Image (cartoon, grey):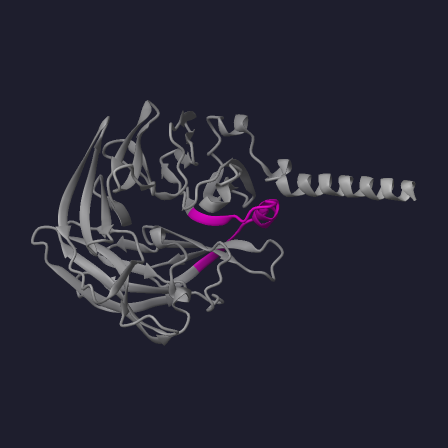
């Protein structure tokens, strides 16, 4: 009897050890890019795309959150570099260089490799980008309530010579880049106000300029649905305007807001309307920060149903330019992402029936049609190798 109890306990101990080992393993070693490989000068030479995945902030309470920069090479093969977690983290790219950010480190990868640590860990990202004129990278974090009771959005900016830290003392509802400057839509929940502000960076200093207060009726609920884009005359961004009470069904308009930089005149154009909608989240973009694009005087907006709307900035007319096929209508997401470049739209798609599960669709915006499918090999295996944590996509960039 004692022998039976002993062997039963031994099996339980071994089983518990194996279970712990299995669930604490974050990434299969065979699927991970080593630090030394990432540091090679020619690392990006054969890379055509990068995706950013991370656990959510609440999953990092044990300090074991994880993010992945998944690079796809010219042959369509995916490989991953593992970092610390950063919910809503993103990637910035310039010529022959990529900026990777996690909760406590910044990495420049490409022609030169540089690492910069952060004194304070961050847990939620806002936007990462590159200012060509100033030759500066930046990454903005949704830091949270500050010591004085106000809201903090920390910003790190710099290049291979070093990074500086400043603070934008506002909650950021939407953001973008306008001719070498960061533009943010800030939200004051107590006053129920929205403001457009500019953030100017120059080497080791930052200035924040209040541009205008956005016309917003307190009788309607506003949610941002796109980045802020701009041309020489206007700022543009998309928002969801919820009408009336929120019950089991919702009435809402998806609205393009246009603000004249000089006169500050504000106009609204309805892109689409929904009435008695039971699942409004199904319409939310795959990625709000990448959902819109401005090209050749046309503003493009992609919703979560795979519908691409086009607003002609000259005629002020809205049309549905194209619709992707086989997009889920229930709001369930499988790491779908968008990336615009000039006349091109690239979309990471998921197909449960296919062997590799993930691929990229390439569309022409002006022609309103799909050009090609681009294969991805190994991405599903990489995502399946994450054990004990849930990981989500937050950014996607084509590098070529």
Residue at x 48% of width, y 59% of height: 333
Instruction: Kindly indicate the quadrant of the structure image that contains residue 204.
Output: top left
Task: Identify the image quadrant of the C terminus.
Answer: top left
- The reply to whether the magenta stretch includes residue 130 is no
Question: In screen coordinates, is 228 left or right of 139?
Answer: left
Of the pair 327 and 121, the residue shown nearer to us: 121
**Residue 112 seen in the current view:** no
Q: Nearer the viewer, residue 221 or 212?
A: 221
> Farthest residue toward the bottom?
276
Report the quarter where the N terminus lies: top right
Find the residue positioned furthest to the top: 161
Give the total number of marks visible in the rendering.
0
Relative to 286, say whether 119 is above or below: above
Residue beneath the point at 26% across and 35% down: 167
Q: Residue 185 in the image: x percent, y percent?
A: 23, 50
Q: Nearer the viewer, residue 169 or 276?
A: 169
389 in magenta:
yes
Q: Position of residue 19 (x, y in %)?
A: 70, 43
Residue 97 appears anywhere in the view? yes
**Residue lying farthest to the left in this orientation:** 263
Query: Is 381 or 75 nearer to us in this picture?
Result: 381
- The answer to which image quadrant residue 312 occupies is bottom left
Q: Magenta span covers which residues?
A: 371-395
Is residue 380 rendered to the left or right of residue 122?
Answer: right
Q: Position of residue 325 (x, y in %)?
A: 47, 67
Q: Is residue 254 above or below residue 224?
A: below
Task: Name the residue located 24 percent from the left edge and 62 percent from the top edge.
Answer: 256
Residue 283 is situated, as x and y percent measured from the top left of the image, at 38, 65
């Amino acid at each position: 009897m004692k022998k039976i109890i002993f062997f039963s306990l031994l099996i339980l101990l071994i089983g518990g050890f194996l279970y712990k080992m299995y669930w604490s393993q974050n990434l299969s070693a065979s699927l991970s890019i080593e630090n030394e490989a990432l540091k090679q000068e020619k690392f990006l030479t054969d890379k055509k795309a990068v995706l950013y995945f991370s656990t959510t902030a609440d999953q990092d309470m044990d300090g074991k959150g994880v993010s992945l920069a998944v690079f796809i090479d010219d042959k369509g093969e995916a490989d991953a570099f593992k970092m610390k977690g950063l919910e809503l983290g993103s990637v910035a790219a310039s010529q022959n260089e990529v900026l990777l950010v996690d909760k406590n480190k910044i990495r420049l990868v490409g022609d030169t490799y540089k690492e910069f640590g952060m004194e304070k860990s961050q847990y939620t990202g806002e936007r990462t980008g590159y200012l060509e004129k100033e030759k500066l990278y930046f990454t903005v974090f949704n830091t949270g309530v500050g010591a004085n009771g106000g809201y903090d959005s920390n910003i790190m900016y710099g290049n291979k010579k070093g990074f500086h830290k400043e603070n934008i003392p506002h909650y950021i509802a939407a953001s973008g880049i306008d001719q070498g400057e960061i533009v943010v839509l800030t939200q004051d929940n107590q006053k129920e106000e929205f403001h457009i502000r500019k953030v100017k960076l120059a080497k080791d200093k930052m200035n924040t300029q209040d541009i205008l207060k956005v016309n917003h009726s307190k009788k309607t609920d506003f949610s941002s649905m796109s980045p802020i884009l701009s041309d020489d005359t206007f700022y543009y961004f998309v928002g969801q305007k919820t009408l009336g009470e929120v019950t089991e069904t919702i009435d809402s308009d998806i609205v393009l807001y246009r603000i004249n930089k000089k006169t500050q005149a504000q106009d609204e154009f309805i892109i689409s309307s929904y009435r008695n909608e039971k699942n409004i989240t199904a319409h939310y973009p795959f990625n709000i920060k990448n959902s819109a694009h401005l090209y050749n005087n046309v503003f493009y907006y992609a919703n979560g149903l795979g519908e691409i709307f086009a607003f002609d900035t000259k005629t002020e007319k809205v049309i549905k330019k194209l619709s992707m096929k086989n997009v889920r209508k229930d709001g369930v997401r499988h790491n779908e992402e968008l990336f615009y470049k000039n006349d091109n739209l690239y979309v990471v798609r998921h197909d449960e029936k296919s062997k590799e599960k993930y691929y990229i669709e390439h569309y022409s915006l002006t022609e309103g049609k799909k050009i090609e499918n681009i294969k991805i090999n190994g991405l599903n295996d990489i995502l399946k190798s994450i054990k004990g944590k849930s990981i989500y996509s937050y950014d996607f960039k084509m590098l070529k």
